[in-house]
Amino acid sequence: MAGYVEEEARVLVNIEINPGIYHLKIEAKEIAKKWQPGQFVNLLLPAGMDGIPFLRRPFSIFMASKTEIGIVYRVVGRGTDNLTQLVKGDSLNCLGPLGVPIKRKIEPSATTLFVAGGMGIASIAASAIYSGGMLLYGARTESELILLPEVTGGLAERMLISTEDGSFGTKGLVTDLLPAILAVEDYTGIVACGPRGMLKRVKEIGERYNRSVYLVIEERMACGIGTCLACAIKAPEGYLRVCKDGPIFLAQEIVL
Ligand SMILES: Cc1cc2nc3c(=O)[nH]c(=O)nc-3n(C[C@H](O)[C@H](O)[C@H](O)COP(=O)(O)OP(=O)(O)OC[C@H]3O[C@@H](n4cnc5c(N)ncnc54)[C@H](O)[C@@H]3O)c2cc1C
Ligand code: FES
């Protein structure tokens, strides 16, 4: 039996929290009930002015209450641009929750180190909060950091922030923080989500310090349920589907 449902959800909130970054909260009772940290939803975005419908687009669910799910999204193209037009009360077709929950790969604990780059925060924040582990969180500049209480609340004591331009936290790349922490702290597993270059670097540093590294991959998708192969990622032997076999993988399972 499929673990996901298709649900006509109701928009509760859709507001710009940072320039070009939105917080979307929707009432999606069935998906909220089933969601586990690390899973995502495939949204059927509204058609634009031209009326051309979209393929679905995947977004991490960063939190769920009994009846609601929360998403943070960056406007990068026509689909996400159209998404900004939704207002309270609009309906939105959702397929989810999809993908393998993080805890099916690694049981997050106080000895897990989380590394998030940019929008990658959305897929790992919940696990970081519940686990008691530490979060390294980086963005290009302060206005790209998502510091909503629901996303990073409760992590203040366990979070180190970096920005590339030094406008908030330590100046530099988030991966610059890794070697010093791994040299002195007893983190056995690393879970990372962010741009591909960041993931490559986390893998390299994690392996140098002999830690297990898990990577959450954000690949372009279509069906989101494992049938179309649009999200195939190279593995040492053949290919894996990011939507169905992931989005979290042990670093050795995939070729970046
Ligand atoms: C499992 C998963 C979880 C995701 N979670 C989030 C999230 O929480 N918040 C968020 O803002 N985004 C997230 N994304 C990325 C999001 O799906 C894309 O930004 C979105 O689909 C873009 O749609 P669009 O129609 O606006 O842009 P398009 O017109 O389709 O593309 C615009 C530009 O963005 C690039 N792009 C589109 N999709 C992706 C992708 N999946 N990965 C890398 N580049 C892409 C394109 O190459 C192009 O350059 C996630 C992706 C996956 C696979
Ligand atoms: S998006 Fe269709 S198989 Fe993954």
Image (cartoon, rainbow, N blue to C red):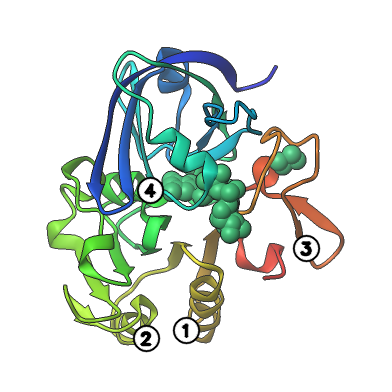
Q: Earlier in the sequence, mark 4 or mark 2?
A: 4
Instruction: Give the spatial CA distance, label 3 vs label 4.
Output: 24 Å
Instruction: Give the spatial CA distance, label 4 vs label 1.
Output: 26 Å
* Amino acid at dot 4: Ala
Q: Earlier in the sequence, mark 2 or mark 1?
A: 2
Does the residue at mark 2 contact the one at mark 1 (Cβ under 8 Å)?
A: yes
Q: Is mark 4 within 8 Å of ligand 1?
A: yes
Residue at point 13% right, 61% down? 157
Does the residue at mark 4 contact the one at mark 1 (Cβ under 8 Å)?
A: no
Provide the residue designation for mark 1.
209
Provide the residue designation for mark 4.
122
Of residue 245 and residue 18, the one placed in the foreground of this image is 18
Q: Residues within 10 Å of mark 3 (few under 14, many from 20)?
A: some
* Amino acid at dot 2: Pro
Q: Residues within 10 Å of mark 2 (few under 14, many from 20)?
A: some
Image position, residue 135 (x, y; %): 29, 62
Residue 64, numbered label: none
Q: Earlier in the sequence, mark 1 or mark 3?
A: 1
Residue 234, numbered label: 3
Image position, residue 122 (x, y; %): 38, 48
Vertical arrangement, residue 65 with respect to residue 236, above or below: above
Q: Earlier in the sequence, mark 3 or mark 4?
A: 4
Instruction: Give the spatial CA distance, label 4 vs label 2.
Output: 24 Å
Vertical arrangement, residue 96 with respect to residue 239, above or below: above
Provide the residue designation for mark 2.
179
Q: Earlier in the sequence, mark 4 or mark 1?
A: 4
Instruction: Give the spatial CA distance, label 2 vs label 3.
Output: 28 Å
